[in-house]
Amino acid sequence: MARFEPKPTESPRERVFVVGIDRPGSEWTVEDSLAELTRLVQTADGDVVGSYVQRLTRPVPKTYIGSGKAHEIADDAVAGEVDVVVFDDELSPSQQANLERIMGEGIKVIDRTALILDIFARHATTREGRLQVQLAQNQYLLPRLRGMWSHLVREQTRGGIGSRFGQGESQLEVDRRLVRKRITTLKRELERLEHRRGEQSKVRSGGGVFRVALVGYTNAGKSTLLNVLAGADAYVQDELFATLDPTTRSVTLQDGHKATITDTVGFIQKLPTTLVESFKSTLYEARSADLLLLVADASDKNVREEIATVQMILDDIGASDAPCVLVFNKCDLLGEDEIARLRDWQPDAELVSAVTGSGMGSLGLRVAREAMQGEQTMTVLIPFDKGSFVRAAHERSHVVHEEYVEEGTLITLRADARMRAELEAFRIG
């Protein structure tokens, strides 16, 4: 008989209720929205053991759902030993405080925003990613501090010993100052990183490298697509927000063009405003790209709504003006009739499967064609003592023909407007 019984080292998975409102006219059905919320809970290592829906035209100002429904959920949560109740929309500070009082101690009340922030905090690996998440968390926390100190305020109202020091309000003001100071510090650090990123982007732009950014709904397969297109080794996992930090890889396109491909953070419906704001420096890659590949999961029944969500967020961050190619991924999961319907709906889209490789050759050619837009062919004769221009021509344009003649290096190339301007003094013919 063993002297000591082994004990599990992993924390038990929390039991979770999810709660949503069925609002007439919503783009997403409440069932689909709660299904996505359930996947978010699973990504955060929780188990959904019950879901609740109330049909309302708008959330109840005090408690988001009706107070009767809230008490029903509270009773069921106690009976079912539930740890967390997650609401599908962002709760106001007063709604959260009121719901916490109804649910009672021992049951956490959070909203979709807090859940997404928690997932982002788990998955951010770079310094910039962690700073961005911390900024969003602090911005979310600031208006909710009063509720977190409400237990001290309640002690003051009872009177008696210790009730005259105002410890609740005093601590609240101290915490508010600390959080505001932290927000200011984080913003300053992120501004420095964004400035550095902007300078690096200018260097790449000046270097004539064609910049491609992968954007799309979370779990659409962007990282897998990057691995196929660029022979990369980006982290791939079948979960929401598997990768947050942008990954950039260099690639030579099929026509010889040099390009960079960047995998950006995935989007989701009801993406917290604080996160969009905090991640603007990361999303700079999308704003400064020469071409966006909007990757969509062709097998998802909500693909139309997901594309609309991505387009709305791209518009919010000022990236909607860049040329964009719609890429339907995971087409290996569709039947012939479904493929035909996609082609009828979006005839200009690329239909691919990053897993099987189907359609990847066509996508590569499409990117190469987009890279050639705006380029023109010119022939230049560069003297031998101007070798730096020959090197620039190779690095920043597509050399069609090159030969050495008595006067120097004769090159025929396809170049963009900036490169043509720099080589204009050597143009012949």
Image (cartoon, rainbow, N blue to C red):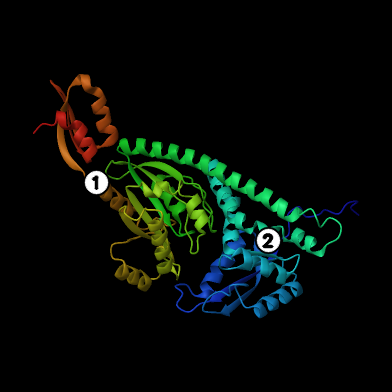
Decide which of 395, 98 is in the foreground and name it: 98
Query: Answer yes or no: do the residues labelled 1 and 2 have beta carbons within 8 Å?
Result: no
Q: Residue at x 72, y 76 (%)?
A: 76
The one nearer the camera, 389 or 336, is 389
The answer to whether residue 108 is left or right of residue 241 is right
Please identify the quadrant where the C terminus is shown. top left
User: Where residue 413 sits in the image (x, y, percent)?
Assistant: 19, 36
* Relative image position of residue 141 (x, y in whole percent): 62, 55
Task: Give the quarter of the image for residue 186.
Answer: top right
Which numbered disc covers residue 233? none
- Residue at (16% x, 40% y) in the render: 377
* Left or right side of 428 for 31: right
Camera-nearest residue between 238 and 389: 389
- Residue at 30% across, 53% down: 323
Q: In this figure, which residue is indicated by the disc labeled 1?
A: 372
- The residue furthest left is 429
Q: What is the crowding at mark 2: few (fewer than 14 residues within 10 Å), some, or many (at least 20)?
A: some
Q: Amino acid at mark 2?
A: Gly
Q: Position of residue 32 (x, y in %)?
A: 51, 72
Q: Which residue is mark 2?
A: 147
Name the foreground residue: 304 vs 347.
304
Note whether 325 is above or below 100 in the view shown: above
